[in-house]
Image (cartoon, grey):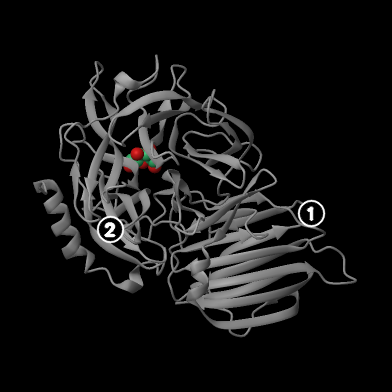
Amino acid sequence: MTSQTLWEARKYEEAFGKTISKEERPEFHLSPRTGWMNDPNGFSWYGGKYHMFYQYYPYDSHWGPMHWGHAASEDLLHWEYLPAALAPDEVYDRDGCFSGSAVALPDGRHLLMYTGVVRERQANGGYSEVQTQCLAVGDGVDYVKYAKNPVLDERYLPEGSSRYDFRDPKLWQEADGSYRCVVGNRAADGSGQILLFSSQDGFEWHYEKVLAANHNRFGKMWECPDFFQLDGKWVLLTSPQDMLPSGLEYHNGNGTLCLIGNYDREKEEFQEESDQSVDYGIDFYAPQTILTPDGRRVMIGWMQNWDTCNHRRKQDEPWFGQMSLPRELSVRNGRLYQQPVRELEEMRQNKVVHENVIVSGTVKLEGVRGRRVDMEVTVRPEEGCDLYRKFAVRFAQNDSYYTSFSFRPGESVLKVDRKFSGSRRATIHQRRSQVKHEGGQLKLRMILDRFSVEVFVNDGEQVLSAVLYTDQEADGISFIADGTVNMNVVKYDLA
Ligand code: FRU
């Protein structure tokens, strides 16, 4: 039975969702039906479609009591809204249905696992949120919360672990039919850790182990874990809070972390070998992955950052928050690689090619403009010339505005800068990433979708993502070199 709270949310989103025109939204990045969106949740393949749920507050474009919004897609790019799936309507989740995940059960039902939140009054008069793991079962549209919720609470936690920071279960089914899930938690020393739980049927859960411990290395609490095998390695993704920068690898605040290593299934031990950021841009957090029916590991993140949520079009906008492009993952030489899902190529139109363009100063190219664009730019020093000092692409550009990527081969640094994108807030507008290049040769693939840019460097070695709310009329693109570069450009419109 649908609760009053869920019924109201469904009624509201149906009425107000209609008032947002297609042009006011990204074209192929999922945005909330109305109001606020944060983390991707329950990313799964069910009933012949991809399902994506999301942290959702339909009534305002700011965070509020969390619901789960819902959408489905056949190609990960064209999303159809479904009615909100969960609302905070039970004693164990009355202050929020926080992040979680989903699997298809062998009996054909869809199982959701999420964090139920209840605010608890503390001695000092403030509140802390008690967090437990809960289940809901459904048919792809309607979900019924499990009668025995919560299925994991403080009784299942190792000694000293926090019951206030215990959230974001990511579950999966093993080859033998049993289930595992990883959950973010904080150990007695206050530092993040990822706990591993197991279940025979998906309903009755047992504590297994601390799969990975932060020991106060990368930020504090670790949110939204994901754990999977890829290209002979095991990958642990998590989103640490309160990070400190480490060179250009990690930035201050809420960030993303990818640990790559090996996993001994018998001992349930993860041995990390390397660490890196997942995204080196401004807006990316809390990613979740899926294994597609054709065997690809695809990741989608919240293309936003908790530290920059004040960077908005306006305070009363009808929607806020969007998902990143779905990205195909691979591991090569101990590094995580990301490429836009190949389905994006189906959306390419109006191919424009410019080869061996000499850039010294500023260049604009025939047919190269737009705000829904897939563009590959390859640069190298012009023969016989000294190594150039700087190369930049400016986009979402008119007389007043632009955002840019600029590359300085002398420092091997690529920078995204949206300071002049029309923003009226003093939030973070720049970020730099170390990139590899041979003598100034660099390859960038940029994807623009009205309110965002994502650049894939050197076939996915690094990705930098940023949202931008520049007026859509600002659709110019130009290329700038300090020194002389030789450049190839292949550009498509995406429609
Ligand atoms: C991450 C997060 C999760 C939590 C959710 C609440 O962005 O803080 O840890 O479940 O958002 O909306």
| Residue 370 visible in rendering | no
What label sits on residue 295 in the rendered view? none
For label 1, count other residues whose C-alpha is less than 10 Å away and answer few (under 14), some (14-19) or many (20+): few
Task: Work out whether 476 lies above or below 138.
Answer: below
Query: What is the x, y in percent for residue 490?
Result: 63, 76
Report the residue marked by disc 1: 410
- Of residues 481 and 196, the one nearer the viewer is 196
Query: What is the x, y in percent for residue 474?
Result: 48, 74
Report the residue marked by disc 2: 316
190 sits to left or right of 135: right
Q: Quadrant of residue 423?
A: bottom left
The residue sitting at 33% across, 21% down in the picture is 156
The answer to whether the residues at label 2 and label 1 have Cβ atoms under 8 Å apart is no
The residue sitting at 56% across, 46% down in the picture is 278
* Quadrant placement of the C terminus: bottom left
414 sits to left or right of 351: right
Task: Say which amino acid is labelled 2.
Answer: Asp
Q: Quadrant of ligand 1?
A: top left
Task: Work out whether 11 lies above or below 213.
Answer: below
